[in-house]
Amino acid sequence: MLKLINFSTFDYDIKRFNYNSNKLISFLNKYNIDGVELLNPIGWQEKFIPKKIVKGVHLKYYPIWLDFWKSDTKELLKQFKSNDNIEKLYGGTNREVIVDQYKKEIIAADKTGAEYVVFHVAHVQLEHAFTYSFTYSDSEVIEATVELINEIFKDLNTHIKLLFENLWWPGLTMLEPDIMYKLLEKINYKNKGFMLDTAHLINTNFHLEDEKKAINYLLDKINNLGELKNFINGIHLNYSLSGKYVLDQINKYRKGGLDLTEINNEVYMHICNIDKHQPFRDKEVRKIVSSINPQYLIYEFSTSSFKQLEDYIKVQDEACGY
């Protein structure tokens, strides 16, 4: 099992290590971390992030993508107001721009020497991130994802492992084994599996009251997967308990209506309040790791400082027994 941390090619990550790859490597060695799962591989420069430490790549995620994929101009204009806004968001006006973006990232991932890439399987419109009144079902998102992935890989010369990550929006939630089987069966690419994000799975239950109950919930849902558990190749190990916040927001926005300008300004913090990317503290978390025994264990944290990153690693190391 490789123990990794999330990292990116963006300045805010590289700057923490004074743009010095030796400092980054020393930091990883200090905490017995084998490497990084990298975001934004197109911006990768080996002088800042040595090839030998890049083990995985997290692909770009378009939260609001299904209407664009279906060329539903009416629905897109309802959300984004103008064709210019649509083009700025997606980088073009036809769905091939999304396919091309993923191809470029996978080619870039191969250049880094990464063993796997991670793809989020979910769709949510902006206002539905607040109201949870979703337009599409899990099955519809899966069907569209199959189309997209098969289009991306049909003429791509790669053997990299493709791991599908769960979210709490419609799509892959890991609550329905039948949908997971459907995704694996219909993807025309052999080297595939799943990346379990523990916080995302916790986020599917609004009524969990503490970390111990959250861990028990995770263990229950993992056990329900049966043989599918064998296809979980990696774990994004992080913790978030936000059910009360989500229920309060649902009540507020369903009752009071929506101002699109207001929620546009608030959406980033809203998502951060749902998905906190914090460490586990309870030692029962070891049962999750041992139950799956993944190839890749990624400490996926959101931190505001170098010190907080160190603190989070120490806390979760202690919980995991490392």
Image (tube, rainbow, N blue to C red):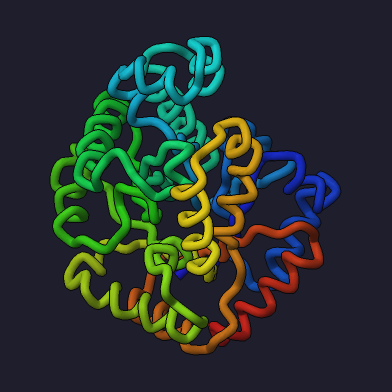
Which residue is depicted at the point 32% across and 28% down?
A: 152
Residue found farthest to the front: 256
State whether residue 126 appears in this view: yes
Quadrant of the snapshot with the N terminus: bottom left
Which residue is depicted at the point 46% across and 55% down?
A: 250
Quadrant of the snapshot with the C terminus: bottom right
Q: Position of residue 314 (x, y in %)?
A: 69, 78
Q: Position of residue 215 (x, y in %)?
A: 43, 80
State whether residue 238 appears in this view: no
Give left or right: position of 67 versus 238.
left
Give left or right: position of 182 versus 75.
left
Q: Position of residue 183 (x, y in %)?
A: 20, 47
Badge count: 0
Give left or right: position of 304 versus 170.
right
Residue 157 placement: quadrant? top left
**Residue toward you, 164 or 27:** 164
Q: Position of residue 196 (x, y in %)?
A: 38, 62
* Rendered view: 115 above or below 282: above
**Residue toward you, 252 or 310:** 252
* Rendered view: 182 above or below 60: below
Residue 303 placement: quadrant? bottom right
Which residue is depicted at the point 41% across and 24% down?
A: 98
Which residue is depicted at the point 42% across and 37% down?
A: 125
